[in-house]
Image: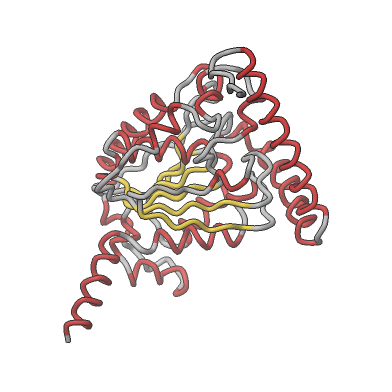
Amino acid sequence: MTTEPEAGRPEASALTSVTSAAATAWNGLSYLARTMGVPRGLRGLAVEVAWTAVHLSVYPWGLLDEALRPGGVHAHHRTDHLPPGERSLLVSDLDGAAIPVLLVHGIVDNRSIFVHLARVLRRRGHGTVQAVNYSPMTAFTGDIRAAARDLGEHVERLCAVSGSDRVHVIGHSLGGLIARYYVQRLGGDARVDTLVTLGTPHRGSAIAHLLPPTLVPRQLQPGSDLLRELDEPAVGCRTRFLAVWSRMDQLIIPQRNARLTHPDLEVSNVRLDHVGHMAMTIDPEAVHLVTCALSRTRSTRERAAEAALTQAAG
């Protein structure tokens, strides 16, 4: 009879490391085949490299915090300065345009990762779009739970300044996991209408084993206590989720770990094929998915459901 080594013993740790290394190596070979084997994969790789270079050039600018702009919810409803195409969101859904959009970046990053996406959202009629910074040292000295509490405080300030009682949140990479913890475990579903995650390690990433053994990297390892906590029941959660993931994501290993599956959550998972981790904030398809998701607010979904019931009854 063979007895499996118990967790916590040296042989168990060694077995876990070997298994993780083998899985990472196999995933790496599959990644190379998907990337180098087709023209679209090579194009996606080129875009990833180019955008990373651009992002690094604007990274210092992103270290400066973006100020909250007061003005109230009705200040965002002016449409006279917009062309017809950009006016359409405001005209068709005033509620959707009035809801502030909060952007939350990933590990050792800052708000500069959203420079393109924020511009697109403003052009689509969203009057309040703000990217929040948290400390780049979070990866080494921080805690996802504490970052989620800080995010909740920022959401409250944003609601107070904008006059709105709800927000949309878009999280890239670790930012999506911070926002998800806030929604599921800290009552954030009362505030967050829609949470969009882009390349977020909902099931962890094997890459985390290569990071310094501080708290956040441990929380990002598959099967961590934090990820198990997020698997706990979330009955009645009012937030709608969109999880966008890519088969070419080089930082989420395996890539399918960026999918969000939970029996109590209203989730749409969308797979992209040839988009790198950093480029998910500029990819046209990903940006289109984001804008479409934010145009379907809780109130518009409720009105659509009522209309469907009325039609069925008639």
Going by the picture, which residue comes out furthest to the bottom? 314
How far across and down, in percent of the image, does residue 116 sit?
57, 51
Residue shown at 58% from the left, 48% from the top: 256
Residue shown at 25% from the left, 62% from the top: 299
Count numbered badges in the picture: 0
How far across and down, in percent of the image, does residue 202 sit?
49, 41
Camera-side residue: 24 or 113?
24
How far across and down, in percent of the image, does residue 263 sit?
36, 50
**Quarter assignment of residue 67:** top left
**Quarter assignment of residue 81:** bottom left
Q: Above or below — where is 193 with respect to 157?
A: below
**Quarter assignment of residue 146:** top left
Residue shown at 27% from the left, 50% from the top: 238
Drawn side of residue 246 relative to residue 177, left or right: right
| Quarter of the image with the N terminus in it | top right
Going by the picture, which residue comes out furthest to the front? 1
Camera-side residue: 125 or 208?
208
Residue shown at 33% from the left, 63% from the top: 78
How far across and down, in percent of the image, does residue 52 sit?
70, 42
| Quarter of the image with the C terminus in it | bottom left
